Image (cartoon, grey):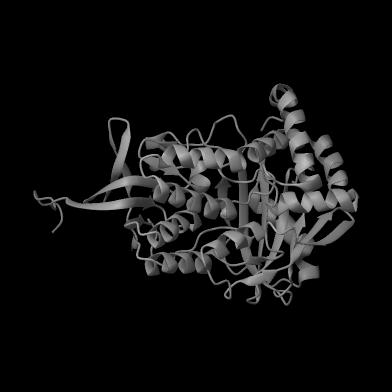
Amino acid sequence: MCGGPFRQAETVSRYDLAVIGAGPAGAATAIRAARGGARVIVFERGPRGRDKVCGDGLTPRAVRALEALDIDLDGAHRIDGLRMIAGRVRRELAWPDTGRFPPRGAVWPRRHLDAHLMAAAEDAGAEIVFETEALPRLEADTVVGVDAAGRRIDADLTVVAAGAPGRVARLLGCERVADEPFGLAIRTYAETPRHADRLLEACLTLRDRHGTAVPGYGWMFPAGDGTVNIGVGALSTMKGFRRLNLNELLADYRRLVADEWELGPDLERPRAWRLPMSAQRRHGAGWVAVGDAAGLVNPMNGEGIDYGLESGICAADAFLADPGGAPAAYDAEIRARFDAFLRTGRRFSFLIGHPLILRAGLRLAVGTATIADITLQVMGNLVDDDTPGAAGRVLRGADRLLAAADPVLRRTRARP
């Protein structure tokens, strides 16, 4: 009955973990925590089987995280490496076999990946509630659970996995840092006879219709199902960013690759999304943020699925080890694992926002086999604060240099 004077009585339930969002980060949290014996409930605003706009690429780092969750990747299309294109230069590089990550990636459309992860969470014992918005419930400065469609959920820990924008982020102050860079991307699908290609393809030399070099790349991610995920992405640090038309950029890139990939017509309307690359907060009393909600997106390639999976696992492990100390322990683990690399990436994005520096940097990035191997590791999210060898040394050296240059980079940044 609508519009009457009566309101449904609030239902109160008790759980160990309440998770807001059922993407890879939220699902990974639920899977790991439920398997560890925690009572978990997950709220997802979308319907069961919903699609999520994404590039669909899984790096070797993401594959390792999925294997840690015992997720069967038989439904995904295997990827063995990356084809990088910069002008007339092409390099085809296999994923390195370092022992830290498996030498294979995948392409798995998000409607299938997310459904698989949600099913695994349910199999582990987690309860998933679809088509329901949940908001954290605060008592003083502590999150004590969530409110969702007339249900009050009391929880020892609330995990925010709903992305950076929106009401949840505003309530907890975990929106992106306004002065830090972010990305925009757009993608669609097209039929191609090359759908079984075993390499991701990234074109690093894009220009907008004003001739401005774009700090970003165009991608062709073959899905193995008769289609390819085709898209482009750009950083907010580029000159003239506000006038950038993503639909035009994608159309120009499509024309560039159409003949080589024998593309059929677009199978759906291109869809765009924002890539957060920072967060004002990622934990507090009674809550943690994971994945995109924690700003865990690589500024140098826009990838975040692997970080979402890893951060979800870290949040669950911290809770299972010490429920009361989980927020602080989680934040310390994420800080040690990712912060230096992501900070370096954000600073680097200011640098390549300058067209002349971007062009010179791209020539360097693929100019020699040694540097191209390091570029491959960066593009594949294989570099972090513990990376050994040349890539790790380059990262640590770049972090020191860019830290010293940071004030100048921000002062002279290319304005949108």
Q: Quadrant of the N terminus?
A: bottom left
Q: Residue 289 location in percent, x, y? A: 45, 43
- Camera-nearest residue between 262 and 361: 361
Residue in the picture at 68% in, 53% down: 232
Residue in the picture at 57% in, 50% down: 307
Q: Quadrant of the C terminus?
A: top right
Number of numbered discs overlaid on the protein picture: 0
Would residue 19 be seen by someone viewing this image from the given angle? Answer: yes
Would residue 59 be seen by someone viewing this image from the given angle? Answer: no
Q: Would residue 123 appear left or right of 101 to someone viewing this image?
A: left
Q: Residue 409 location in percent, x, y? A: 73, 26
Q: Residue 302 location in percent, x, y? A: 64, 49
Whether residue 301 is situated above or below residue 120 in the rendered picture: above
Q: Residue 85 location in percent, x, y? A: 82, 56
Q: Would residue 105 appear left or right of 88 to someone viewing this image?
A: left
Whether residue 183 is situated above or below residue 343 in the rendered picture: below
Residue in the picture at 76% in, 37% down: 352
Residue in the picture at 81% in, 69% down: 260
- Camera-nearest residue between 146 and 256: 146
Hey, which quadrant is residue 300 in on the image? top right
Hey, which quadrant is residue 39 in on the image? bottom left
